[in-house]
Image (spheres, helix red, strand yellow):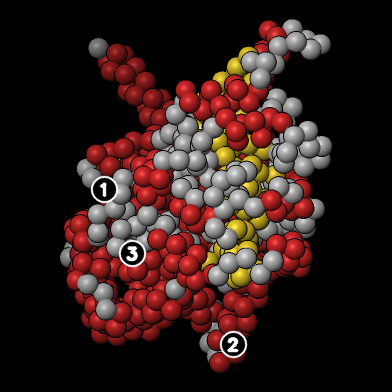
Amino acid sequence: MVPVVTALAVGGTLLLSRFELLLEDPVFVFTIAMVAFLVGPLFVERLGQPGIVGPVLIGAVIGPHALGIVEHSDAIVLLGEVGLIYLLFTVGLELDLQGFKEAPENAALFGLTSFFLPFLVGTVGTMAVLGLDLWAALLLSSVFASHTLLAYPIVNRLGVTKNRAVTAVFGGILFTDTVALAVLAIVSGTVRGELSAWLIVQVVLSLATLFAAAWFVIPPISRRFFQTFSQESYFEFLFVMVAIFAAASLAQLLDLAPILGAFVAGLALNRLVPRGGTLVNRIEFVGNAFFIPFFLLHVGMLVDPGVVLDGPRTLQVAGFVIGLMLVTKYVSAALVAAVQGYTAHERGVTFGLSTGQAAAALAITLIGYERLGLFGAEILNAVVLMVLVTAIVSPWLTERYATRLALERDVESDGESSTDPTILLPLSHNAELQRRLLELAFVLKDDETTEPVHVLTVVQPGGDRSTDEQVAAVREELAEVAAVGGAAEVPVHTETRVNHNVASGISQGAIEVQADQILMGWDASETFGHRIFGSIIDQVLDRTPLPVLISRLGHPINTTRRLFVVVPNGVDHHEGFFEAVHLVKRLAASLGVGMTVYVVEGRTHPFERLFDFVEEEASASFYSITRWDRLVPTLESRTDEDDLIVTISPRRGDVGWTSELDDLPARLADLPPHSFITIHPRRGEPEYDRQYLRIE
């Protein structure tokens, strides 16, 4: 019996030793991390909470302060730091800069009020009640003075993102997060023993240098890179990674937090990475699946549940901080609402949105805990509890008031097809710019698209190769096109047709897929076999009443800086005018650029009013050009290579058509942008056109 017991004891010891070695094995640790990233968000989302909370909770459970399953190793610390930088980059990337540009004063008022009121009251309160010294109080107050848009999906789902109060909150993040990170820079310098007037000057100069480098270096280099390597999406992604960490490294050289550099890099690339494209989906995928979860796991492993259980200190700190944050955020929202004349429901939405805490709060707290030593474990635990509480409170408040705000709006026409159009994209199997056309189609789609882009190639029988060989070759190329759509998370349906008449095949395909619009590319080097664009395109224009967009893109669509719109006088009487304006405004909104509208041989005021009727939001400046012969010289003098010219051009003989439109595409092709889109509005169905209008 004794030998058996001895054998069992030895076996148990060996198994325990083997398990301890397994806990330190990189493959095992990585496996546990992947399980945490998968299970954590799924679990907490079933409880109705944001998925961001899941990895934090699992990290706290499996970390060294609880079960001790996984050691808080250098590898996790490294990946956590990378995830932190990546997280702040995505914050800058997702800001609505166009909305901020349209009403910067509203964003500034809300952002500065919602930051400095909680910040100042919080500094005094945490010093008096929690006994923190000045610098710890300043840093902790900056943590909850900023905000994260945890409840953005709610206002987006309810369709109130364009409300004046909501856009002010979105733009306000630019101020709250920037000031919070500036406070972090000042406190960091002070903790290192550099407190002086020169420190403030140094921080201001460093911030100016960082922003200048980001704004004047990253965008032009990015445009040039995207223009050169846009055919390889993984090169684009690697370039973005270089930009992120180069900016973070520059921030470190300037004695600023690396996360501030990443945040500024996100702002600099904001307009160059449009929503709905392949690149932004790669950025979000890698961040959400790998880097950011490692940061959250890293934070969770720093949490010590024992501190919460040992005594009331952590709960007292958390309760005070959460209560102070909620009260000061409400007062801030009420003050701004009083000044701006917001309704009670608008005030409630701003309060709900501004109470969310996640990205900046965790980032600043982690630096204050790990690097500066200003926070103890109870502060770290309290901030994590604050994130958990606001993850419940912010969506609840926002849902309540945003629902009421949505019900306040006037009823609008059914615009389902206007927000998510079905696009038919005919491609020639030897087209050189297929990817750019596909990216343009993605930009015209809704962010949360469900309708696919239908890509069609018509094969003409005959020629050197058999029809079967041609079809097989085309299908192979279309499979690559579909892969691009998959990377952008936009459904792409491909089809190959055999027809002696290509235009007939395209128009018939549009009918069968019930397309809302047709998007075609034009090679300006082709000779004009018939009328304007050549026989195929002109035949399509004759055969279909659908709106047809003819594009020639000399640069990737995401590098567009400005949008110039040419509007012939009289086109406003065309039955498809409002739908064409909707397309133009959607293009501007998706690219995050303003519009310069030239009304040729007409007055601007009527068109300003008509553009404003269309429900898509985009800023525009209107100018009148008295004669057609002055249009091209004006565009030539005012456009650059990264601009895009869009012309609303009726078909020959339609209302608003003029013979000057016949040779306009050829003349536009010679201008510096080498990029233009001609929109031929829909023929007939004036009732269909009304769905694009907002009903006041």
Residue found at the far bottom of this picture: 197
- The residue wearing badge 3 is 163
Q: Do the residues labelled 2 and 1 touch (CB within 8 Å)?
A: no
Is residue 571 found left or right of 165 in the rendered image?
A: right
Q: CA separation, marks 3 and 2?
A: 38 Å
Position of residue 24 measured from the top left corner of the image (x, y, whole percent): 48, 37
* Residue 483 in view, yes or no: no
- In terms of depth relative to the viewer, which is nearer, 313 or 451? 451
Amino acid marked by disc 2: Val
- In terms of depth relative to the viewer, which is nearer, 383 or 487? 487
Is residue 147 found left or right of 501 in the rendered image?
A: left
- In terms of depth relative to the viewer, which is nearer, 300 or 583? 583
Compared with 643, 196 (above or below) is below
Amino acid marked by disc 3: Asn
* Residue 609 in view, yes or no: yes
Compared with 480, 651 (above or below) is below
Compared with 474, 664 (above or below) is below
Q: What element carries label 2?
A: helix
Whichever of labels 1 and 3 marks the residue nearer the N terminus, that label is 1
- The residue wearing badge 1 is 49
Q: CA separation, marks 2 and 1?
A: 43 Å
Which residue is rendered at x = 29% and y = 53% of the image? 412
